[in-house]
């Protein structure tokens, strides 16, 4: 049974940084592309970033490129999202997701069959 558990969210002030973690179990982690999505109240779940099975390539939403960095540690079955210069509009529930890495569809929400429960990030102004 695949489990994804996010951590690292919290309440921060605008301009701060946070690092989210997602610990995966129940899967051969190095076979999976990993991604982060977020969902603000009343909005659709949106793509943030994805990383290929070996960390060789990373993809980002254009609007977030430069402030967010994804990385992974295959030895510890963990994916990270480093967020900097946080803004109030970054307030959302942040989700980790996993899919077999077939070299396509990294930014598509429906391509990911496995999801965590989310970790809340709240940025105050």
Image (spheres, rainbow, N blue to C red):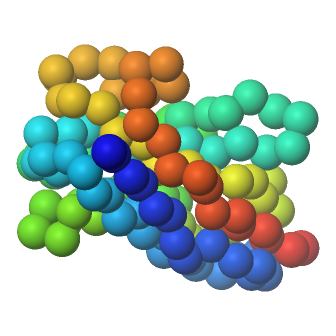
Q: Where's residue 4, x and y in %?
A: 41, 54
Residue at figure coordinates x 89%, y 35% from the top left: 42
Query: Horizontal placement of 22 versus 18: left or right?
Result: left
Number of disc labels: 0
Picture quadrant of residue 93? bottom right
Q: Nearer the viewer, residue 53 or 4?
A: 4
Q: Where's residue 95, x and y in %?
A: 56, 49
Residue at figure coordinates x 35%, y 65% from the top left: 23
Residue at figure coordinates x 52%, y 72% from the top left: 7
Q: Height in image: 119 above or below 102?
A: below
* Residue 49 shows in the view: no
Q: Looking at this view, name the residue that lies furthest to the front.
A: 1
Q: Where's residue 39, x and y in %?
A: 71, 42
Q: Where's residue 24, x and y in %?
A: 31, 58
Query: Horizontal placement of 65 versus 27: left or right?
Result: right
Residue at figure coordinates x 61%, y 55% from the top left: 118
Quadrant location of the C terminus in the rendered image: bottom right
Quadrant location of the N terminus in the rendered image: top left
Picture quadrant of residue 13? bottom right
* Residue 14 shows in the view: yes
Picture quadrant of residue 120? bottom right
Q: Height in image: 66 above or below 105?
A: below
């Amino acid at each position: 049974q695949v489990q994804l558990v996010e951590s690292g969210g919290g309440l921060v002030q605008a301009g701060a940084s946070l690092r989210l973690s997602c610990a995966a179990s129940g899967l051969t982690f190095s076979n999976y592309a990993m991604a982060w999505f977020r969902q603000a109240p009343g909005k659709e779940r949106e793509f943030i970033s994805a990383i290929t099975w070996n960390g060789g390539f990373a993809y980002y939403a254009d609007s977030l490129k430069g402030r967010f960095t994804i990385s992974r540690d295959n030895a510890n079955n963990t994916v990270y999202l480093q967020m900097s210069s946080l803004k109030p509009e970054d307030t959302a529930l942040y989700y980790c997701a996993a899919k077999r890495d077939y070299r396509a569809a990294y930014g598509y929400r429906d391509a990911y069959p496995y999801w965590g429960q989310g970790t809340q990030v709240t940025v105050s102004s």
